[in-house]
Amino acid sequence: MNQKWFFTLLCSFSTLIGQSSVFESEPGYIYVTSDSSTVPIYVDGNLVGHTPIKKPIPVIQGVHFIGFHPTTFKDPFLSYGNIESDKQIFVLSGDTVRISFNTFLIDENLKKTKIEYKITNYIGIGMITLFLCQLWIISS
């Protein structure tokens, strides 16, 4: 009988101590705007909606990556470059961070970066060709 009483008391106290909501602390919010509509918005690689998003997005406190391109569709060679399509932000609990995307400027930056990579590749191919020609001259 003593064990049943102790178990009942323990269960009732554990519900008082347990987590009362999904968030341990008050969530932070991200409010996203864009220069054009129907732009997909990704938070930490997960699709959260398309602009215009009327309500702020609740997130836990910490660092988050916001973007409008899914990480799986990015060009693998450009994903390591300095492209400003993803924004890294830190959200405090109870705070609202406002982010605005200008998709036209980011797409122009992406086009410039692709052209720079092509030029770099052509220079590399030219240098390798010169090196192989020098080796051929030395060996003959």
Image: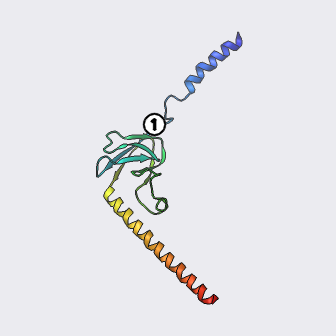
Render colour scheme? rainbow
Q: Looking at the image, which residue sits at the far top?
A: 1
Residue 69 point in image, percent of width and height? 41, 52
The residue nearer to you, when weighing 94 against 86, is 86
Frontmost residue, 7 versus 54: 54
Q: Is residue 8 left or right of residue 42?
A: right
Position in image of residue 88 (x %, y %):
45, 53
Say above or below: 20 vs 1: below
Q: Say which residue appears at 42% left-offset and 44% top-offset.
A: 47
Q: For the view shown, which residue lies furthest in the right direction?
A: 2
From the top left corner, tell me how far across and down residue 137 is, in percent. 59, 89
The residue under the point 45% across, 58% down is 75
Residue appearing at x 63%, y 20% in the figure? 10
**In what quadrant of the picture does the N terminus appear?**
top right
> Can you identify the residue that label 1 sits on?
26
Q: Badge 1: few (under 14), some or many (20 or more) residues near its Cα, within 10 Å?
A: some
- Residue 4 vertical placement versus 140 (above, below): above
* Amino acid carrying mark 1 in the image: Glu
Image position, residue 131 (x, y; %): 56, 82
Q: In the picture shown, does residue 127 fall above or below 98?
A: below
120 lies left or right of 53: right
Dividing the picture into quarters, in which one does residue 51 lie? top left
Q: Quadrant of residue 5?
A: top right
Q: Which is nearer the eye, 104 or 26?
A: 104
Q: How many marks?
A: 1
Considering every residue shown, the one lying at the far left of the view is 36
Classify mark 1: helix, strand or loop. loop
Q: In the picture, which quadrant includes the C terminus?
A: bottom right
